[in-house]
Image (cartoon, rainbow, N blue to C red):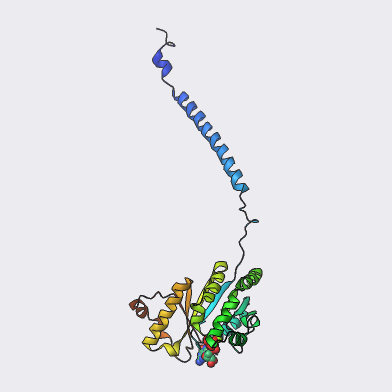
Amino acid sequence: MDVDSDPAASSKPTQMDLEDQTDTKGKGKAEEGNGKGEELADSIGSLSIGPGRTNFKKKPVIIIVIGMAGTGKTTLMHRLVCDTQASNKRGYVVNLDPAVMTLPFGANIDIRDTVRYKDVMKEYSLGPNGGILTSLNLFATKFDEVVSVIERRAEQLDYVLVDTPGQIEIFTWSASGAIITEAFASTFPTVVAYVVDTPRSTNPVTFMSNMLYACSILYKTRLPLVLTFNKVDVAKHEFAIEESLWTAFHIPRQRLITGRTLI
Ligand SMILES: Nc1nc2c(ncn2[C@@H]2O[C@H](COP(=O)(O)OP(=O)(O)OP(=O)(O)O)[C@@H](O)[C@H]2O)c(=O)[nH]1
Ligand SMILES: [Mg+2]
């Protein structure tokens, strides 16, 4: 019988045949893969990702100082300005209080340079609160210019400190307050520093009403909020950092900064 003509022998692949087949298949796949890999590398190369091509820009952190009348916002601002200078940080100061008589620090942007609060009161026959509100509304219409001034200097700045009027509701519940806060928050990392007058908050009722106000600002602005217990040289703040106090009222405790702002 002719061995070569054995159908079984011719159809059964030898070990070598199998290896050859695997090699050829593997090679085929590898070549195919290489082709795809090159294609992928080309398309990645065409994307504008690379060390020299990133367009991430350094942005300053905006700190908006908000608090009830007389809680010490301007004094805290002064301390923050001194602190940034002392620690070689580059700060930029914005005053949004049109009714303040004197500032203990130099403001880079001052609402009083644009809107004269007393003239606004006269022109629109308004009382003091209406005057502040209208001044802020007028200033808010030009706030994109303030943001672009800060944007132009963004690379050279670490912090932008913003003082707000004592009439807290004028800033937190008015359209202008929302426009200003959102304009900042949509362009820069923004934080609210809510100033608490510690001596005036030792009474539980006052304390809770103050904290609820802080919560309303937190939920309205949807920005990180730092509770800043001020005037602790007059009354200690320890009662306020009791964990049980916060959990009992289901109030989100963000971060507490405590310190004396008046030296
Ligand atoms: N003892 C003490 N007094 C302070 C402190 N901070 C501010 N004050 C005093 O509180 C008063 C009000 O301070 P401001 O900084 O003007 O308060 P404000 O919140 O800016 O006031 P408005 O802008 O009018 O709402 C001033 O007499 C300050 O000297 C503090 O840390 N300790
Ligand atoms: Mg002030």
Of the pair 22 and 222, the residue shown nearer to us: 222
Percent across and percent down for residue 197 are 46, 87
Q: In this figure, what is the number of numbered marks? A: 0
Percent across and percent down for residue 223 are 49, 71
Residue furthest to the bottom in view is: 234
**Residue 211 visible here:** yes
- In the image, taking residue 210 as reference, residue 162 lies left or right, namely right
**From the viewer's perspective, is residue 200 above or below residue 65?**
below
Residue furthest to the top in view is: 1
State the quadrant of the C terminus.
Answer: bottom right
Residue 89, located in which quarter of the rendered image?
A: bottom right
Residue at the location (48% across, 29% down)?
22
**From the viewer's perspective, is residue 222 above or below residue 127?**
above
Of the pair 188 and 246, the residue shown nearer to us: 188
**Residue 73 visible here:** no
State the quadrant of the N terminus.
Answer: top left
Of the pair 115 and 49, the residue shown nearer to us: 115
Percent across and percent down for residue 32 are 54, 35
Percent across and percent down for residue 151 are 63, 69
Residue at the location (50% across, 87% down)?
69
